[in-house]
Image (spheres, rainbow, N blue to C red):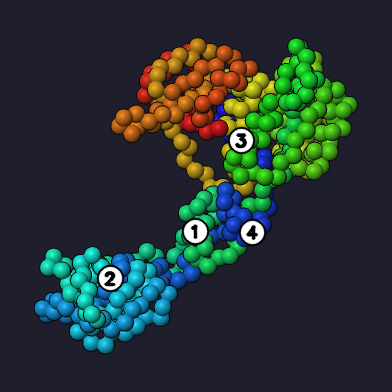
Amino acid sequence: MISPSEADALIGRHLTCLPIESLPLVQCPGAVLRENVYAERDQPPFDRVAMDGIALASSAVQSGRREFRIQATQAAGDVPLALRSPEFAIEIMTGAALPAGCDAVVPVEQLTRTDGTCALAAEAKVAPWQNVHRRGSDCTQGTLLLTAGAQLGAPEIAVAAGAGMARIRVSAQPTISVISTGNELVEPGDAIEAHQIRRSNVYGIVAALRRRGFQRIADDHLPDDLATLTARLRVHLDTHEVVILSGGVSMGRYDLVPQALATLGVREIFHKISQRPGKPMWFGVGPRGTAVFALPGNPVSTQACLARYVVPGLYAAMGEATAELDKIAIAAPVEVKHGLTSLLPVRLETDEWGRPWAHPRHTNGSGDFTSLVGTDGLVELPPGPNEFPKGFVTRLYRW
């Protein structure tokens, strides 16, 4: 068996980088950027007024003037005016360009307005560039704002829009087929016998993928019949870039997935990882470059392998820059008796000091999917035998 870190390296080495497409900004949240974004112009592009009030020449106040005639009103978006002389001030709105001849803004709360004039309150102090967001103080034209490989959230989308980009080049989303295997599985809502179980893993996988923004997802259910399994898998391999299977990869007589994949020319990269749960996980690459993740059928194993390997692998194929993994301290001691890496479900909570902690949620075996309710992800603990104390810091993988 290989270690989890070796599995990471093998998956990364054999995934095919997904193509690039140009999309409108509104379609890009969650996508991975595949071009650099540079500042279209200085930001702010002009000396920007940061308060509602009056714009004036600070030198006039420093010379003793405390009352000003209102020359005009200038709103945000108006062509900037020019101050006639220091005895005047211009009523100004937040976001407006600073009028020529002005170098300070006095907020409205420090003004007394009468017919056509404004008087400064006794406590009002005025200095050059007060309440003015200077041109280019955030960044200058041509500054690198976003680097290829960034995942696009709300701030990144807003920055791209501010740089004048109506469309941006991002990784195309992979076409994903999620497949369950097993004669014992029955669709939710259908009549079920006492010896059967519900088809639940696929729903959990699809929900986790959609939550991360993946949309091009199909699903299927295949029986434990080698001929049918092989024929249907052939179709999925020919029409999808990623195939995720749940079940059929252990050592039983009806664990037929590796055999069917081999018949179809899918090259096995590894089978079994030194971890619990999820040891039987299988990964390979099809003749057309299709990435095949065959996950164990027990629900906790399925979700653990999905969070630990599949989702990071998909983002790597989309060109996401390698990011520092989340790390967190466990909130209680954990004993690992076996010599395998442990993938332990956890619930995240913050203590009274604002510090996050991972509270272990032990399951009643890898089939106990009900224990995952209310958890946020899993932590990875090194092989035992060992006891890890409260405060032990380790990697966190979110569902």
Counting residues from the N terminus, which is met first, the one under dot 2 or under dot 3?
A: 2
Query: Which residue lies most toward the bottom here?
Result: 84
Counting residues from the N terminus, which is met first, the one under dot 1 or under dot 2?
A: 2
Residue 380 in sight in this render: no
Disc 2 marks which residue?
A: 53
Residue 80 in sight in this render: yes
Does 383 sit left or right of 302 as displayed? left
Task: Tell me the CA gap for discs 4 and 3.
Answer: 24 Å
Disc 1 marks which residue?
A: 158
- Image coords of residue 364 (percent x, y): 57, 13
Query: Which structural element holds mark 3?
Result: helix
Are the residues tagged 4 and 1 within 8 Å (C-beta)?
A: no
Query: Which structural element holds mark 1?
Result: helix
Query: Which structural element holds mark 4?
Result: strand
Numbered badge on residue 208:
3
Q: Nearer the viewer, residue 80 or 113?
A: 113
Instruction: Give the crowd class for mark 3: few <14, some 14-19, many >=20 residues within 10 Å.
Output: some
Viewer-nearest of discs 4 and 2: 2
Counting residues from the N terminus, which is met first, the one under dot 3 or under dot 1?
A: 1
Q: Quadrant of residue 187?
A: top right
Query: Which residue lies most toward the front here?
Result: 115
Q: Nearer the viewer, residue 55 or 245?
A: 55
Q: Quadrant of residue 184?
A: top right
Numbered badge on residue 23:
4
Q: Nearer the viewer, residue 62 or 307?
A: 62
- Image coords of residue 34 (percent x, y): 59, 55
Viewer-nearest of discs 2 and 3: 2
